[in-house]
Image (tube, grey):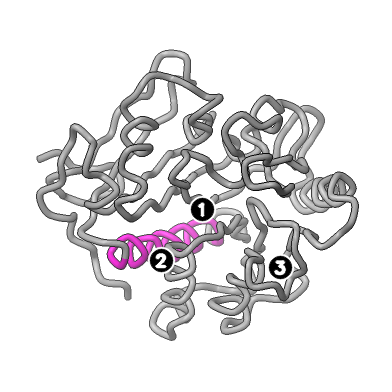
Amino acid sequence: MAPDFLGLQGPWCERRALTPDYHPRVLRQIVGFKDAEAVAQYSAREFVRRARAATEARGAFMVALAGGSTPRRTYEILAEPSFAQQVNWDSVHVFFGDERSVPPDHQDSNYRTAHHALLSRVSVRESRIHRMEGERSDLSQAAASYETTLSKSFRAGPGAFPRFDLIMLGMGPDGHTASLFPETSALSEIQAWVVANDVPQLKTRRLTMTAPVLNAARCVMFAVAGPDKADRLAAVLEGPRDLTHLPSQLIAPTDGELLWLVDQAAAARLSLKPEDPPSLAPTT
């Protein structure tokens, strides 16, 4: 039994350097849980812990939210009084890793999901919620506008990327994350912070942060649950490097933590098999 680097003890916690072509300071941690609810509960605790640490250290917590069912449950948990009261919401600045080309009140909007589940239920300042404008007719211009928003918010210098305290991500059954889909042009972007990405397989176009921005974060936290993710999760974490077809492999923070939270169903094809989930310290 090996301890993970967050101080938990669990039979299935891994801390190891990634392959040599990654930055040597990158550490990948994989933590297994019984089911999606346990993943969401732990994600909420991590959000609280990192919000506290960032606020204490820098006076603000810069977080990028994800879409999808598992993050939505995390947002619902964070909105519960026992969690919400632990976060200084005045210090929280909310961004989004990607967005669909829909209005903010559309049922498919990532912003709508987060707003209904969390943002409308806590005291975060409206001026500090920065949504992507997926409803705009010119998504390339919307991407440029969001990059300007990031630049003003982070005051990143020339050649630098915004440094989020936490970026929350999911992974699709095809191995995509954010809106970085297999065989799409955004995968090769190394300069732009936000792009409009054509996704032919879904016959759509989406806004997404690029891999360099995601990799500049202090922590990137994946939450992956469900049997439909099992094959791709094994390929991403244990298979050969194939960035064109497995975009989630692009994510390797240059000076930060890479945290994978996975349930037993998603982890079924990994060579590391969970026995019991790690115990979670109660929130206070």
Residues 32 and 49: in front is 32
Residue 110 spot, x, y in % from top left: 63, 64
**Is residue 82 highlighted in magenta?**
no
248 relative to 147, above or below: above
SS type, badge 3: loop
Q: Which residue: 89% across, 56% down?
A: 137
Q: Are marks 3 and 1 in contact (CB under 8 Å)?
A: no
Q: Hey, which quadrant is residue 114 in on the image? A: bottom right
Asked if residue 121 lies left or right of residue 69, the reply is right
119 relative to 266, above or below: below
268 relative to 62, above or below: above
- Write the start and end of the magenta stretch as one range: 37-55
Residue 278 spot, x, y in % from top left: 18, 55
Residue type, mark 1 in image: Met
Q: Which residue: 62% across, 82% down?
A: 120
- Per the image, the residue denoted by label 1 is 168
- Per the image, the residue denoted by label 2 is 44
Distance between mark 3 and mark 1 Cα atoms: 15 Å
Residues 210 and 270: in front is 270
Q: Which residue: 77% across, 27% down?
A: 159
